[in-house]
Image (cartoon, rainbow, N blue to C red):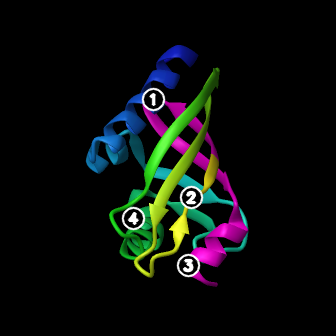
Amino acid sequence: MGAAENKQLIQNMFAELSKGNAEAFLNAMADDVRFTIIGTTKYSGTCNGKQELIEKVLKPLTAQLEGGIAITPENFIAEGDYVVMQARGKATTKTGKPYNNTYCQVFRVANGKVQEVTEYLDTELVTAAFGK
């Protein structure tokens, strides 16, 4: 796949996620995806594989949110195997705190699947909303 197809894959992932189709979002990732969240928050670190991502990040994060996160992509930049997405998230914690973060995610795509993701975000906001 070229840069245009890789960009379309990432755009489709987030279009499906915005419709509530988390399964399509996850299916776009390789089973052994390497997903890194920068910083030292409770969610920071590298998950090796979809299952670890689900167990260590997605389930615990979802459990602390009222209705999940609405991600609005703003820009996509693609070159070779890499796609960069800038996005904004809007959510509310179950304790009523707003959690509206800004994201930059760098995806590496190979064989039609997301192989690696590095997520940059406001880590102080993560800690303020969810604790250490």
Q: Quick one: label 1 or label 4, which is nearer the N terminus? A: 1
Q: Quick one: label 4 or label 2, which is nearer the N terminus? A: 4
Which residue is labeled 1 in the image?
11
Q: Would you say the residues marked 4 and 3 are in contact, meaning their CB atoms lie under 8 Å apart? A: no
Amino acid marked by disc 2: Asn
Judge the density around disc 4: few (<14), some (14-19), many (≥20) Cα neighbours within 10 Å. Answer: some
Give the x, y percent position of residue 123. 70, 66
Q: Would you say the residues marked 1 and 2 are in contact, meaning their CB atoms lie under 8 Å apart? A: no
Residue closest to the eye, 93 or 4: 93
Q: Please give the name of the residue rendered at 55% of the width and 53% of the height, measured from the top-left corner.
A: 34
Task: Judge depth for marks 4 and 3 and give the one in front.
Answer: 3
Give the x, y percent position of residue 4. 53, 15
Q: Please give the name of the residue rendered at 58% of the width and 47% of the height, measured from the top-left corner.
A: 117
Task: Judge depth for marks 4 and 2 and give the one in front.
Answer: 2
The quadrant the C terminus occupies is bottom right
Task: Judge depth for marks 1 and 4 and give the one in front.
Answer: 1
In which quadrant of the rendered view does residue 101 lie? Answer: bottom right
Which residue is labeled 4 in the image?
54
- Kindly report the distance in space between the C-alpha atoms of the residues bearing marks 1 and 4: 21 Å
Magenta stretch bounds: 104-132
Q: Quick one: label 4 or label 3, which is nearer the N terminus? A: 4
Which residue is labeled 3 in the image?
130
Give the x, y percent position of residue 35. 55, 55
Eyeballing the image, is 113 above or below 4? below
- Kindly report the distance in space between the C-alpha atoms of the residues bearing marks 1 and 2: 21 Å
